[in-house]
Amino acid sequence: MIKKKHLISICLLILCSIAFGKKKQPNILFIMSDDHAAQAIGAYGGLLSSLNPTPNIDKLASDGIRFDNAFCTNSICTPSRACIISGQYSQTNGVLDLDNPLDTDKQYLPIELKKLGYTTAMIGKWHLHNEPVNFDYYKVLPGQGKYFNPSFLEKGKGVWPNNLVKSKGHSSDVITDLTINYLKNRDQSKPFFLMHHYKAPHDMFENAPRYDDYLKDVEIPEPASLYNQPFWGSEGTRGKNDSLIHYIGTSVSPRHNVHHKKSTNYTNRFFGDSIDAKLGTHLAYQKYLKDYLRCVKGVDDNLGRLFDYLKKEGLWENTIIIYTGDQGMMLGAHDLIDKRWMYEEAMRMPFIVHYPELIEKEQVSDLLINNTDYAPTMIELAGGTTPDYMQGHSFINTLEGKPEQDWREATYYRYWMHIIHHYVPAHFGIRTKQYKLMFFYGAHYMPKEEFKGHYWATQYEGIDRETPHSWELYDLKNDPNELHNRYKDPNYKEIIKQLKKQLLDKRKALNETDKNYPKIEKIIEENWDN
């Protein structure tokens, strides 16, 4: 018969074994830079990798996993961020464009992680309009925020949006300081979930002065499509007989020269309209990329500082570190400077995960993921399960080195805005691993009578103007730079048919149809088989 004291000892051993056997919840650090394109990260290769712009991010990738097929579902700040935090596509979460706020009850990611015992914080660029009420702590930029001496809206400093506090310095430095300070003073009884978001390298670039000479005497490699691309695009992007090449989009070269109120091409903006076009394009591209990469360098150096702190404090091994951008940037490809487009440079997102306890070094995945998948994956990494209301899917199996079951074959994209800011026409489409099919329907979803009250309604000519309706198809295996639209090539007729069926199925399954927008619905119906 077991004596009482022996029984107590056995029970204590069992309890200890259970306690030690239970895996400690990891911290989660979700780092996002604004407009940081994959092609501006050395680990992703490409034209800019020889410049070595991101050694700290590259090391993070080599010590973890890099996703080469990560895409946004709408390449613009507010909608992309809404998709990330809600795990839902735009029509479902309600954020179609820059004006739409995300409802506070749809800040699902911090809500779910708090249920799992996490303390939650949001520091840096927020850009979702409504207060981030579901975070235990926040200190966020109002709107875009400023590059220098930024103000922040801070929890506990008053009533939103009057809880403004000031700071001094460059935003990338300041945001890093704020995060390190938060980590020093956090509730250490719980694992943390921290969203650490930089403003840089968003357009209207302003780098810290210490980077003024960075790349000063270096010539930045230029994409061939900056100068010549006779087979790219369609009537929806160029106009009939190239009649809209001076209107649609925003260019590096002087070709876009008829926009409302001001010259929007990079050449004329900085070198005047009398400069030779080819020379001006070259000089403008060099300035554009150097301004951008100086901001990128500031982000990377600050990440080195943040990573050093995590290592020093013993947080490195048990913290899942994710690095991404809210979308990509064209960076001169197709002679375009912004994002918004479904072309690779704007649609592709960097996505890197570092977690030594789970992920082996030097992993690369070609799994087709998008930004609605990020929240489900983080929730499952934290020990939870993906909520039914989320439309994205967890790819935790890939992180664990196991195959995914019944994974998507195509990812959906939609740019809802139309001829606003950078004069990009509204469009949607799907991307598989080999093909991309896009339809430029060229009309604003909002009826003209509803434009009143929107700041862009008086600033941009043509927002109520339909642009041509057209299709584009790119064979990414044989044409990775999307230089040749194959939509009218008879050799792709069967492929187009299959892709259109996939596109139709996706739109229905994801609640991304236009049943509430009869004008657009009619355009789609009339042009579906064209």
Image (tube, rainbow, N blue to C red):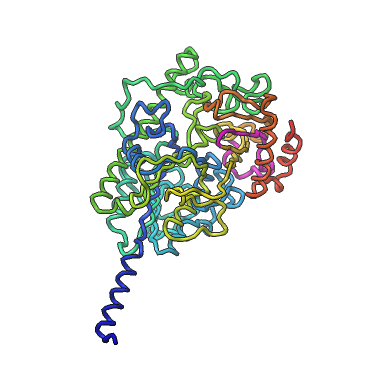
Q: Is residue 263 visible?
A: no
Q: Residue furthest top?
A: 276
Q: Residue at x 73, y 35 (%)?
A: 528
**435 or 288, which is in the foreground?**
435
Q: Residue furthest front?
A: 1
Image quadrant where residue 19 sits: bottom left
Q: Is residue 87 visible?
A: yes
Please identify the quadrant where the C terminus is shown: top right
Position of residue 209 measured from the top left corner of the image (x, y, whole percent): 30, 32
Position of residue 314 measured from the top left corner of the image (x, y, whole percent): 25, 53
Q: Relative to 513, say whether 251 is above or below.
A: above
Q: Residue at x 53, y 51 (%)?
A: 393
Is residue 452 part of the magenta span, yes or no?
yes
**499 or 518, which is in the foreground?**
499
Q: Residue furthest left?
A: 312
Q: Which residues are magenta?
A: 433-458
